Amino acid sequence: MFSTKNHHIIPSQFYCHQECSNTMILSYFFDSISSLWLQLNNVDYEITVVLFTVSLLVLAGAWTAWISKNTPPLPPGPRGLPLVGNLPFLDPELHKCFQTLAQAYGPIVRLQLGTKVGVVISSPAAAREVLRDNDATFANRDVPELAMDAVAKGHSDIVFSPHGPGWQMLRKVCVREVLGTATLESVYGLRRREIRNTVRYLHSQVGSPVNVGEHMFLTALNAITSMLWGVTMKEEERTRIGVDFRVAVAEAMELLGKPNLSDFFPGLAWFDLQGLKKQMMGLVGRFNKIFDAITDRGLGLDGGKESRDFLQVLLQLKNEGDAKTPLTMTQLKVLFMDMVLGGTETTSNAIEFAMAEMMNKPEILKKAQQELDTVVGKDSIVEESHINKLPYLNAILKEVLRLHPVLPLMVPHCPSQTCIIGGYTIPKGARVFINIWAIHRDPLIWENPAEFHPERFLDGKLGFRGGDFSYFPFGSGRRMCAGIAMAERMFLFSLASILHSFEWKLPEGEELDLSEKFGIVLKKRVPLVAIPTPRLSNPALYD
Ligand code: HEM
């Protein structure tokens, strides 16, 4: 029965000649099926079944071949070992390791990370395809195993919430209500109080070496917790809670930064082989206790105070409970968490790198101080209202986030469906790293990319809003940083204050080390230790 028509010819054409048209292939198979059915009545039943099965198999094979012929390949990448893939060969300095891989394999590299596919994006064109052209598809996160439970219960924070109404609501509350210009302005006094405390403390240390990063971390943490609940809680209570909180945040960052086998072999997650999940559960319990103490205090207030902190803004929002922002107590707590985790180390590490780069090039430091002396004067102190009048300091912020982007691989994205990027197939569920560190140092884009040169940003053409994919330290698209406004203010106000108030020098015999240490948040390998000496006209300006 297969001797008629082209049964022997067409399959070989199909497999051998690429140019065979898809329409021909499909019409051939529909013909085959219909002719088979027409003849069913005339032949032996068993033979018919066998032939029918063979025909289906051929159809399936042809379909697979058609699909694979029409599906672009996976991106190129290094060979790995069975089971573990490329994991054993990845250098812990991942941002540099990924840059080297991009030099060998191109701007889109595939990795096998245990059972997971990883994809590294290292060019502006590919980043634009991911974050702009396919923004909705890539708006999900590859959720680490340690955050899975929270996501499954709908208790997740903004960073790991899946793209959807829950995430949208949290983000709206965070960006518009809490970190919007009006609320940020209203808590200026709380920010200022903490920065003045730091200046006062540094003044008490004049002539002695201080750990710049550590003090900037404490300043950022105190400023953020002060904005969060600094009106609600009295200073003494706030300091006590701040200490517990600081320890818990440091443990959470360390835990999240540890490579977790369960992320690479989700099948093993149930066994929690490294005990990380257990540790995380303990930590969640501690955070809950801290937040309960704070929110209980907030709930006890009558809300009639003139000055308000974020806690009071959020509790009011929760109590008003409009249908669009049905904020729960758990969501309120996770918002706090995002602000503390997202806003402390990022800002303080950027300030530490900026100070180190400037001390390495004293002419830049002098120029920044001269600008401050012109705008603020030596008989006065820096206020946040000055920061828009300091173009050189703003250029320093941009340049430090170019050279040392504090989230060098951003927060991994995850496509919700298989899609094509740069001519390659990116499978659904892949872990997509965007190597902004490599893009920000690409010699095809930047002149002398390794050099700290704030002047390159003085023309004001490049901004932070992710519109240009050669420079996007806060990400781009719908998952870009939710705290840009706060980060800008905190960085500029803190750096301006310590540069304006003090001269800085290295301890005798010390050498400046500018090297980086990879982590979710990039940090200086060797902490910057420097000696402050006063430079303002009147000691009262340090009170
Ligand atoms: C110098 C300081 C900072 C830098 C360089 C920075 C950078 C980033 C980057 C690169 C992302 C990931 C974007 C993506 O994956 O597409 C991100 C996400 C985020 N950042 Fe920041 N950030 C900073 C400060 C802050 C501050 C101060 C806050 C809050 C107070 C904050 C809150 C967040 C949140 C909530 C997300 C997750 C957004 C989402 O998934 O929708 N960040 N940040």
Image: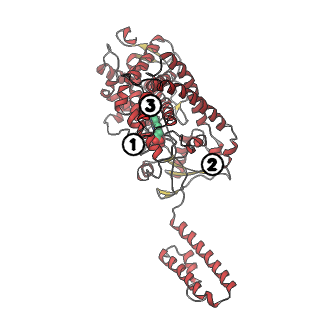
Q: Amino acid at mark 3?
A: Leu
Q: Earlier in the sequence, mark 3 or mark 2?
A: 2
Instruction: Name the residue at 54% across, 58% down.
Output: 74
Q: Is mark 2 within 8 Å of ligand 1?
A: no
Which residue is denoted by mark 2 in the rendering?
86
Dot 1, how many residues are within 10 Å of its Cα: few (below 14), some (14-19), or many (20+)? many
Cα separation, mark 2 vs mark 1, equals: 31 Å
Q: Quadrant of residue 175?
A: top left
| Residue most extreme to the bottom | 42
- Residue 70 in sight: yes
Q: Is residue 185 left or right of residue 509?
A: left
In the depicted structure, whether residue 19 falls above or below residue 229: below
Cα gap from disc 3 to disc 2, whole angstroms: 48 Å
Front disc: 2 or 1: 1
Q: Position of residue 176 (x, y in %)?
A: 38, 37
Q: Earlier in the sequence, mark 2 or mark 1?
A: 2
- Residue 232: x %, y % from top left: 45, 22
Q: Residues within 10 Å of mark 3 (few under 14, many from 20)?
A: some
Residue at mark 1:
466
Q: Amino acid at mark 2?
A: Asn
- Residue carrying label 3: 315
Q: Disc 3 vs disc 1: which is toward the camera?
A: 3
Q: Are marks 3 and 1 in contact (CB under 8 Å)?
A: no
Mark 1: which secondary structure? loop
Residue 429 against residue 382 in the figure, above or below: below
Instruction: Point out residue 206 in the picture as x, y percentages from the top left corner.
Output: 46, 11
Q: Amino acid at mark 1?
A: Gly
Q: Secondary structure at mark 2?
A: loop
- Pointer 2: residues within 10 angstroms few (<14), some, or many (20+)? some
Dot 3 or dot 1, earlier in sequence: 3
Q: Could you say which is closer to the camera, residue 138 or residue 127?
A: 138
Q: Quadrant of the N terminus?
A: bottom right
